[in-house]
Amino acid sequence: MLAAILQSAKYKTGLYTSPHLKDFTERIKINGVDVMKDFVVNFVDRMKPAIEKIKPSFFELTVAMAFEYFAMEKVDIAVIEVGLGGRLDSTNIIDPEVSLITNIGYDHMDILGNTLVEIASEKAGIIKQKKPIVISERQPEVEKVFIGKATKMDSPIYFASDNISIAEKKSPGLEIHSSEMSLLVEPELKGHYQLKNIRGVIQIILIMRQLDYQLPDSSIVDGINKTVRLTGLKGRWQKISEKPTVICDTAHNAEGLLEILNQIKLTPHKKLRWVFGIVKDKLPEKVLSILPTNALYYFCQANIPRALSAIELLNMAKEKGLSGKVIPNVNDALQLAKHESSPEDLIMVGGSTFIVAEVNGL
């Protein structure tokens, strides 16, 4: 959304995100256009001696590639998403205008820590000396971590949920209010969970205005209303067909899936069917324990080594009172779900980014 707003305001905008769904080049974009494949190939060729000497991780190499591309193309500004942490993340060499932390959940615990406080401490590593930091929402368990780090770094801290209010209208629109603006938007990203993200986005924009970026209300509305079209983002509550309705979403941990479950409740449907797969390191038992028992599951697995086998997933799911069948291939599972559905049913596809990535035609 930030990148889309900046593009709408006529800034040449770099956007670095991960992971990709279909093609590696999705990770590095300028004004919504993927990096050229020739650049990727040439960069790797040129960097081979350094790669052999330094032995960077795949992610570190990709970050270096993105930063060189943005520098070469002379972008006005870049929106950089961290990888999994913050403090030790390879993106963290930048000196940002402003940093943003969304909500903190249990993810990447093997690396970031076992408690929300430990995880938040790693995320807080992106807070830089005297640079503003925005936290999308207050979470009582971790807000002291961010306040403490911001104080130590002499960084202004903003909790967006304190300053930005959003009212849902009966039409698909949202009214956004702050002390400085009042806007009516119809977000292209439909997930109800995006309301939390929008607050963070608006707070960032207000700060950037103070830094003399020219970001008129019209660009904010345009960016939020056209995020997918302007940036090419995929897999966020993305409807890929109707009758039955098929939705793909890359939510992959308990916190993300709870947001999806709330969205499902708001979506009219007769029977919920879920093409579901997960990776081994995402606390499958915790995830399975929150899934609805009245849905029918089509257990599958992404074609990657980290995928939890569909048969093992079924066995674990049965212990949580879930019922379904095993169809290992993602697209075969989706086709069977469609075949068995009535037009009023809702089919979810997800549980892992890698499951969504394998859906044909996304």
Image: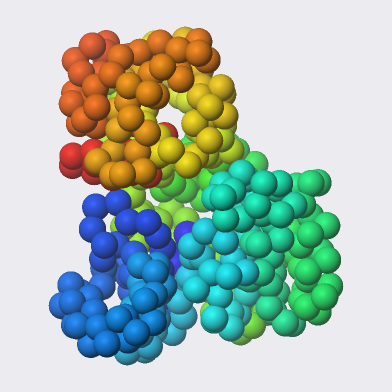
**Residue furthest out toward the left:** 38
Q: Nearer the viewer, residue 339 or 232?
A: 339
Residue 136 image offset from top left, x and y in percent: 66, 55
Q: Is residue 307 above or below residue 18?
A: above
Residue 235 image offset from top left, x and y in percent: 35, 45
In the picture provided, is 79 more to the left or to the right than 275? right
In the picture provided, is 27 more to the left or to the right than 46? right
Choose top left, top right, bottom left or bottom right for residue 318. Answer: top left
Q: Nearer the viewer, residue 28 or 56?
A: 56
In this view of the protein, can residue 196 be seen by the observer? no
**Residue drawn at (32%, 26%), measured in percent from left and top?**
310
Q: Name the image quarter holding the C terminus.
A: top left
**Residue drawn at (36%, 28%), measured in percent from left and top?**
276
**Residue drawn at (25%, 41%), measured in percent from left and top?**
303
In this view of the protein, can residue 290 be seen by the observer? yes
Choose top left, top right, bottom left or bottom right for residue 244. Answer: top left
In the picture provided, is 129 more to the left or to the right than 75? right
**Residue drawn at (33%, 21%), measured in percent from left and top?**
311
Q: Is residue 277 above or below residue 146?
A: above
Residue 146 image offset from top left, x and y in percent: 76, 62
Q: Is residue 227 above or below residue 15?
A: above
Q: Is residue 303 above or below residue 89?
A: above
